Image (cartoon, rainbow, N blue to C red):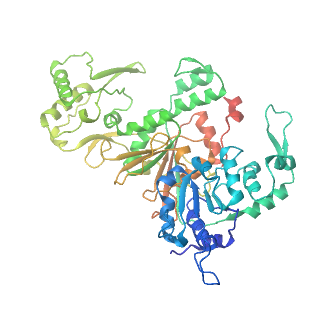
Amino acid sequence: MINLYPHQQKAVDELSNGKILRGDVGVGKSLTALAYFYSKVCGGVYDDMGSMRTPTDLYIITTAKKRDSLDWDKEAINFNIGPDREGSVANLKMTVDSWNNLGKYTDVKDAFFIFDEQRLVGSGTWVKSFLKITKHNKWILLSATPGDTWLDYIPVFIANGFYKNRTEFKLRHVVYNTYSKYPKVDHYVDVGHLVRLRHKVLVDMPYLRTTVRTTKDVLVDYDVELFEKVVKKRWHVYENRPLRDVSELFSVMRKVVNSDESRLTAIQSLMSTHPKLIVFYNFDYELEILRGLKDECWDLALSHPGESFEVKELSPSELQRELRLNSSSGSEELSPMRSETRSDEKTSECLNAPQKSSKLQCSTETDFLQESLELQNSMDGTSSEKKSPESLSGRECISKPQDLTETLATGSTTDSDLSGSTTTERSGGLSSTCSGSETYGESFEMAEWNGHKHQQIPETDRWVYLVQYVAGAEGWNCTETDTMLFYSLTYSYKNYHQAKGRIDRLNTPYTELFYYVLRSNSMIDNAVWRSLNEKRDFNESKFGGKF
């Protein structure tokens, strides 16, 4: 058994069947719900007659990530509750499953359900299954944000018997806009009654946090010319055709902004001071860019900012032969190892680094090092200081960014008031150097949690964990790091708020938590960021006329 915090014990005393346990992310709702089940439902103690109460099986409906990571199983051990009847208290059985499988349990009776993380919005399959389950079982619901509008509370109100169905609720409380082309709520009536019903079903868990959230707003670049072509000419720059509608306009604008390489550069900078980093992103094309953090070519690309960079598959022997040919011929023509780009009517050349096994690095092979450095020096042309292999022997040549903790020292803001102003600083200012301790290409692990992969957080000293907002904004926790980065902005304030709570837990060993938000000075990023600061979702339809 464990001792509960005062706010948790207070919630256990106030909970009863059909209520919503509302608490911010990381305050211990799971533990509180299990404590309530153990003490008030399954009968963890003997009754007045000296016998144990009738056992009740426990079903927990949660997110897929929280189910797979066994978070609930770990919490239940404290109360001697497990997936097998043998050894569990009162001979009960605990079943943990995801919301996607909710329909499997509509025939269960005389059990207790804990619905973790609010998913009951609208009138879809989950809501129908929920209403069937609540007719024959006891239940409670856990949520940090139980409802943004009164319509969100309809399933819970129906399950508690306050209304027969959605139609009754709407006839009594909802007034629609008669001039709208689609059903749009104009206002609600008899709101005082709704407030009383909400107060009846909510059990709050207020908790004064000891952690301090520091949000650092990192200003990154974007392709202004390409962006203006999208906005002003309404042109799909990726498919070379006119844009179909406003929705596609916003989609392409975001892709132009979120695909800029300065965002990846900023992450590389942070990795020098934050060895364990959780990165949230939106779209699959962002994931492909983020996977580039593991491409060895980035070590060299960062040491040549502004130059073109291209990956070729070459074996070590092919690379060595190519280097010898280029260093001995003295030809001015571009070889397959070099490419040419034009920027502001100036030609820049760069060396293409192969992937993985054929990576150009500071090897222990002195002859290979010497040839590599000679070729790089000859291509630099203006460099008067030549590097020697002795100075690099046994170490990897990388680009070491400036410390963002110093760069952004004046750009931090305490997250207790998100609507407050923030000072931004531009990332960048990279300096080329070689280091034996700050290597990125192969010295860190990368894992993902999204619709493609469900990988756990690496158990190493250096890692990057890529998380898609919808898939991983809630239902899991990590106390191994104090740093989170938002590669791109989400339209949903709920997802943004929930994502921050993944590292802000009761048992975190850190007192200060850092959140880096990458955003450009583009109109789309500014508009979305303004909405998040105002603690509301971004609505494209409201801003369509401004673009």
Picture coordinates of residue 228, whole percent (x, y) = 58, 24
Quarter of the image that includes the C terminus: top right
Picture coordinates of residue 58, whole percent (x, y) = 58, 63
Residue at the (50%, 51%) spot, across then down: 65
Residue at the (53%, 70%) spot, across then down: 91
Q: Is residue 370 above or below residue 439?
A: above
Picture coordinates of residue 467, whole percent (x, y) = 48, 45
| Callout count | 0
Q: Quadrant of residue 431?
A: top left
Q: Quadrant of residue 39?
A: bottom right
Residue at the (44%, 44%) spot, across then down: 448
Q: Is residue 139 left or right of residue 432?
A: right
Q: Is residue 177 above or below residue 138?
A: above
Q: Is residue 22 left or right of residue 380?
A: right
Q: Which is more toward the observer, 171 or 83?
A: 83
Query: Can see residue 208?
Result: no
Picture coordinates of residue 218, whole percent (x, y) = 50, 44
Q: Is residue 247 above or below residue 177?
A: above
Q: Which is more toward the observer, 396 or 197?
A: 197
Q: Is residue 253 above or below residue 119?
A: above
Query: Can see residue 442?
Result: yes
Residue at the (16%, 18%) spot, across then down: 329
Q: Which is more toward the observer, 149 or 310?
A: 149
